Image (tube, rainbow, N blue to C red):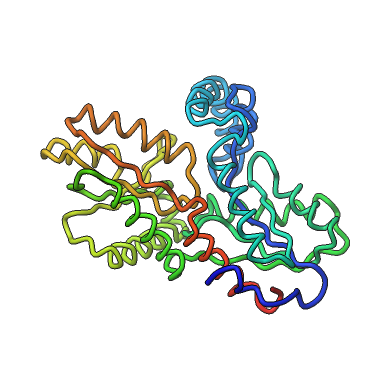
Amino acid sequence: MGPNLYKGSPVDGKVGVLLLQLGTPDAPTPGALRKYLGQFLSDPRVVDWPKILWRPVLNGIILTFRPAKSAAKYKLIWDDKSGSPLMRYSIRQVELLQERFPHAIVTLGMTYGNPSICNAVDSLRKKGVDRIIAFPMFPQYSATTTAAATDALYKCLVRQSVKRVPDIRIVPPHPEHPGYIEALVKTIEEDLARLTWDPERFVISFHGIPIRYCQQGDIYATHVKQTTRKLVERLGWKKGTWRQVFQSRFGPEKWLKPYMEDYLQEIAAEGVKRVFVVAPGFTADCLETIDEIGREFLEVFHEAGGEELRLCPCLNDHPYWIDAMEQIVYQEGKPWI
């Protein structure tokens, strides 16, 4: 694949490629985090408790105490010019994909925060776009991410009272897409080659969700297994040398297991000193990778007796990932693009 894959111009009208990402606060401040978390945690796709029970907890406890703690974490990874890593890499993905599809208009929309999906759609429409290929940046489907993003996309068309609704295609999940798996493999192999020590364990970490969501029909856990199986096969990791885990628990419910912090403590107690961590479900580095894994879980591992924990960079703007994004957009966008 490469810059020459895009052969011609759209069939009729203008085509937009809209990358759908979760979101990020506008600044690493308590005020900005309160606004962002308020929007994020008010979405019933994320927390589906009855509003009469959830709102007092959210407004009375979480939005009172959590913004300051989250702001302090964001400050550790924030860049004064480009903002959060998620924003920086998402913008870079837009720029690089735009080079691959010069006759289309590629842009970014966040489910929560800015630039919002509504603003992105409005901008595309004003530029004459009548066909939108919406590309959720979540290889594994979950109602908490993919469905939340597509909800926001369709809701904004209703709120804007659009008379000429653009034709829309939603790129489906791609947990086993060859290009996606290849990009993961290349990223991992390149990072392993930089190490001056040999990992004793490989840890494959995905964001968790409540078990109840899966019991109610969310297929996320199945997609996680599919990606893990393909990745391990391609890398040739032997049984007993790797473990797939979940991270980022929130609230009192039981989430998908095993929990990453528990696993790190377990293997450290067994005498394992060096681990290599990869997070395939995140297409761009963010707070959950750089801070939660790279700092918090590193501390957990050290306190339990471990020594080295290497976090592999996410796909970010790696050329193989941009190739994969190009392949996916081209496959799902035909004959529009």
**Whole-percent x, y for residue 330 in the image:** 61, 72
- Name the residue: 65% across, 77% down: 334
Would you say 167 lies left or right of 197 here? right
Residue 151 falls in image quadrant: bottom right
Would you say 277 lies left or right of 199 here? right
**Whole-percent x, y for residue 192 in the image:** 29, 51
Would you say 244 lies left or right of 72 here? left
- Name the residue: 53% across, 22% down: 61
- Name the residue: 85% across, 55% down: 126
Q: Nearer the viewer, residue 330 or 207?
A: 330
Name the residue furthest left: 271
**Whole-percent x, y for residue 17 in the image:** 68, 61
Location of the C terminus (image quadrant)? bottom right
Residue 296 falls in image quadrant: top left
Q: Nearer the viewer, residue 230 or 97?
A: 97
- Name the residue: 21% across, 47% down: 199
Answer above or below: position of 51 versus 326.
Answer: above
